[in-house]
Amino acid sequence: MSGRRRFLQQFGATAGAFSVHSLFNQLHASEISSANHLVRDMSATKVAAQEDYWSVIQQAYTVNPNIINLNNGGVSPSPRVVQEAVDRYNKLANEGPSYFMWEVLDQGREPLREKLAELAGCNKEEIVINRNATESLNTIIFGLDLKTGDEVIGCKLDYPNHMNAWRQRALRDGIVYKQLSFNFPIENDEEIVAAYEKAITPKTKVIHITHVINWVGQIMPVKKISAMGHKHGLQVVCDGAHSFGLLDFKIPDLGCDYFATSLHKFLSAPIGSGMMWIKQEHISKIWPLLGNGDPRSTNIRKFETLGTRSFPIEQGIGEAINFQLAIGSKRKEERVRYLKNYWAEQVINTPKVSIKTSLKAPYSCAICGVQIEGMSPADLGRTLFSKYKIHTVAIEYESVKCVRVTPHVYTRLPELDKFARAIKEIAATVK
């Protein structure tokens, strides 16, 4: 009886992030609910500056106090509840992998799909759970039926993995991959839309658009580009790696045909988790990246034939969704934008310092680039870490030369104050 009872207790613990027994309900629901109650009548913009509220959120993270991590654009840490969920599922799986993985944890994918669809504002039959945006976009890029001479329009500041996938299709299949150049920041949607439209020819079939440019944080007008592209009979692929879980939107509202994201960025899901969305009418047209018994099926699950995968990571996504919903997408977006502007406005008028990102809400949120005249991004990045223990990422790519700075909801104002002081001090030493 004790063995049976223990099994049932374990099964109850893994019955789902969306049950009353979820780890989120055990660890955070009460305190976040109380914090939400105190700001219930405030707008999201006003809540963004309420430090007492955000201190509750900050305490849910386990970040290293010895460094200031301002590279959340690469990968974000998970809150403690997500880490503990992955640990719990991993321990359970290892008690009998072939049973607990396939017979227990695997049953959690459909509830997870439903919750992701709810967060994304779409049909659950359009959602694929995978490992990252690169896997999703490779699936789409290599899965589209394109022939020699067909043209694809992208941008030179799209993500390298996805540009390389298009280049491989050009080498293998003879498609024509055209890339636009932009000098960001641009605070004019119509200028961007016009550039894509000008590149269209009778042979153009696809536009590839990055929702948030990872190098400098420019928010691209995906909805307007999608509408323009559809007017010309084109399909639109959207890379949402840096937008989902950060910006407050629903995927169908973007108007694109395909969408990909990495959930381990701003959603703070387990590292190595991603999501792909394909508009239902296109599912049968896309070949799976990995072989499937019915590759022309209309069933979105044909893209999940990955073989053995990390079930603990997959199921940990559920607790990240709980955490996201407790805060609220709009509050989160406004808070992270507030943090970005908080430090940028402190240094923007400093001699030799230039900001490479718009500070206006429609055009940026979390990511912001900063440059010091006379100092390479690599040297600036090294100095920030060696002298101040501030972790950023140095970028020298195409027309972009800056240090990319990306706070998250766990980032504290004193940390950003220290960063701003560091930029001013470093700039003062440059001849």
Image (tube, rainbow, N blue to C red):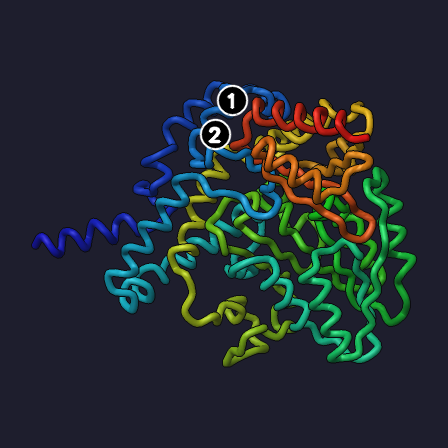
Is 15 on the left or on the right of 176, as rendered? left
Q: Is residue 176 above or below residue 332?
A: below
Q: Which mark is residue 58?
A: 2
Residue type at the position of mark 1: Arg
Residue 182 position, x and y percent, is: 85, 49
Residue 113 position, x and y percent, is: 47, 56
Residue 69 position, x and y percent, is: 56, 37
Q: Of 284 and 137, which appears nearest the observer?
A: 137
Q: Quadrant of residue 164?
A: bottom right
Do the residues bearing badges 1 and 2 touch, measured as CB atoms within 8 Å?
no
Location of the C terminus by quadrant is: top right
Which residue: 50% across, 39% down? 324
Residue 245 position, x and y percent, is: 57, 43
Q: Mark 1 sits on what residue?
A: 40
Q: Residues within 10 Å of mark 1 (few under 14, many from 20)?
A: few
Q: Of 290 and 11, which appears nearest the observer?
A: 290
The residues bearing labels 1 and 2 have C-alpha atoms spaced at a distance of: 19 Å
Location of the N terminus by quadrant is: bottom left
Q: Nearer the viewer, mark 1 or mark 2?
A: 2
Is 335 on the left or on the right of 234, as rendered? left
Which residue: 83% across, 37% down? 187
Q: Is residue 40 above or below residue 26?
A: above
Q: Of 42 and 382, which appears nearest the observer?
A: 382
Residue 393 appears in the picture as rendered: yes
Q: Is residue 243 above or below residue 288?
A: above
Q: Is residue 259 above or below residue 144?
A: above
**Circle 1 — which element?**
loop
Which residue: 33% across, 66% down? 102
Residue 329 appears in the picture as rendered: no
